[in-house]
């Protein structure tokens, strides 16, 4: 972020002012002003979530209501600036799905001196070895819905693919996955990015944090959940609740979990060259439940959000 961009943002934030009685998801809160001036900008760790249950877990875990966090608003998005584990942070809910996720994060990058990005929230489990409540920290992220949809051939034995299309992945019926193109300052043109990487340094921090964390016990089931690091995650604009497609994303990308935002965050961080890491706790099995059983996200999104946020806090502590 250059000096002019930072100054423009900081001055703009100062002009917004702060209401003394703000509402944080329906709970009255008193916000205190934390001055942000061009002369003394503080690097901030952006701490993200996507929707209400995840934000609720952060509000409780981080003490947003009583912890002296300052609320700033941009384009309707609410950004809460304060401290967690001695680190200067900005906590915010991006909204669900790709565009909301990318927009909220890019707005923050253009207005705040953000040094790192951490996310905590829930996902559907696509790795058969994982159970509801378990936490996974993938080391890379892909889009599973970047694709072409083709007609079958007249004989029904194949697919009529566009001339431009080069198949790189197995297809799922008419759905032929493709790769996203991205650009950043060190690139002359858009290039294909099969996976958007998680920062290697943050992965090492996460490993140390998990070693020191000790057992994480589910408040719902009483069992010790697993916290694992590595592998891939996938993101798309669909709520995945289909056992066949679940197997497809696991087989095709090695996906351990599927969600609707994380690859967008990783993409924006890739272009802005900001270190990124996401913590996802499984709220459901993305269609892997027993036949006839409904998806269990509604029953588990709250407690799984708590699991993810506790692990994220341990990572912040270790940074």
Image: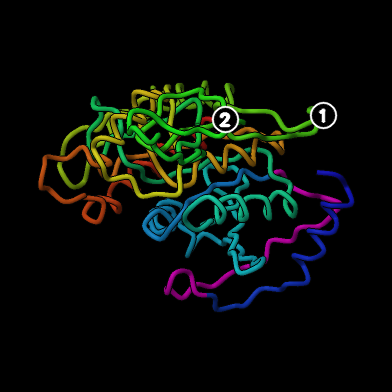
Q: Position of residue 84 (x, y in %)?
A: 53, 47
Depth order, front residue of 301/241 = 241
Prevailing secondary structure of the magenta residues: loop
The answer to whether the residues at label 2 and label 1 have Cβ atoms under 8 Å apart is no
Q: Earlier in the sequence, mark 2 or mark 1?
A: 2
Q: Position of residue 301 (x, y in %)?
A: 30, 52
Circle count: 2
Local SS, label 1 = loop
Task: State which region is magenta.
Answer: 23-43
Q: Is residue 131 left or right of residue 140?
A: left
Along the viewing direction, whichever of 245 and 130 lies nearer the viewer:
245
Label 1 packing within 10 angstroms: few (<14), some (14-19), many (20+): few
- 288 over 186 or under it: above or below: below
Residue at 42% from the left image edge and 25% from the top image edge: 253
Q: In which quadrant will I find the N terminus?
A: top right
Local crowd size for mark 2, using a 10 Å CA cut-off: few (<14), some (14–19), many (≥20):
few
Residue occupying image coordinates x 20% and y 50%: 296
Position in image of residue 307 (x %, y %): 33, 42
What residue lies at 26% left-to-right and 51% top-to-bottom?
Answer: 297
Looking at the rendered structure, the secondary structure element under dot 2 is loop
Residue receiving disc 2: 165
Residue 81 in view (yes/no): yes
The answer to whether 210 appears left or right of 243 in the picture is: right
- Locate residue 291: give its quadrant: top left
Assess whether residue 32 is covered by the magenta stretch. yes
Residue tagged 1: 188
Q: In which quarter of the view is residue 310 placed?
A: top left
């Amino acid at each position: 972020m250059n000096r002019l961009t930072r100054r423009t943002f900081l001055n703009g934030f100062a002009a917004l002012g702060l209401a003394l009685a703000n509402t944080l998801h329906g709970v009255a809160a008193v916000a205190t002003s934390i001055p942000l001036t061009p002369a003394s900008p503080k690097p901030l760790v952006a701490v993200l979530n996507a929707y209400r249950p995840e934000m609720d877990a952060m509000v409780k875990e981080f003490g947003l209501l009583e912890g002296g966090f300052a609320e700033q608003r941009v384009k309707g998005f609410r950004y809460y600036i304060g401290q967690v584990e001695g680190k200067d942070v900005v906590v915010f809910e991006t909204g669900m799905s790709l565009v909301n996720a990318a927009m909220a994060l890019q707005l923050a990058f253009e207005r705040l001196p953000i040094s790192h990005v951490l996310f905590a929230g829930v996902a559907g489990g696509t790795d058969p070895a994982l159970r509801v409540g378990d936490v996974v920290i993938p080391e890379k992220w892909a889009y599973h819905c970047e694709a072409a949809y083709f007609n079958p051939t007249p004989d029904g034995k194949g697919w009529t693919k566009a001339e431009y299309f080069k198949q790189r992945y197995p297809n799922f019926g008419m759905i032929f996955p493709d790769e996203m193109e991205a650009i950043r300052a060190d690139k002359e043109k858009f290039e294909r990015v099969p996976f958007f990487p998680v920062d290697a340094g943050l992965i090492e921090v996460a490993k140390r944090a998990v070693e020191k964390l000790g057992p994480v016990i589910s408040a719902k089931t009483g069992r010790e959940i697993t916290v694992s690091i590595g592998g891939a995650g996938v993101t798309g604009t669909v709520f995945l609740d289909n056992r066949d497609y679940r197997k497809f994303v696991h087989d095709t990308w090695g996906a351990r979990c599927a969600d609707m935002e994380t690859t967008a965050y990783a993409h924006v961080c890739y272009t802005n060259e900001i270190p990124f890491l996401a913590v996802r706790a499984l709220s459901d099995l993305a269609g892997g439940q027993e036949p006839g059983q409904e998806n269990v996200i509604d029953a588990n999104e709250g407690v799984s959000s708590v699991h993810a946020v506790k692990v994220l806090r341990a990572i912040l502590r270790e940074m």
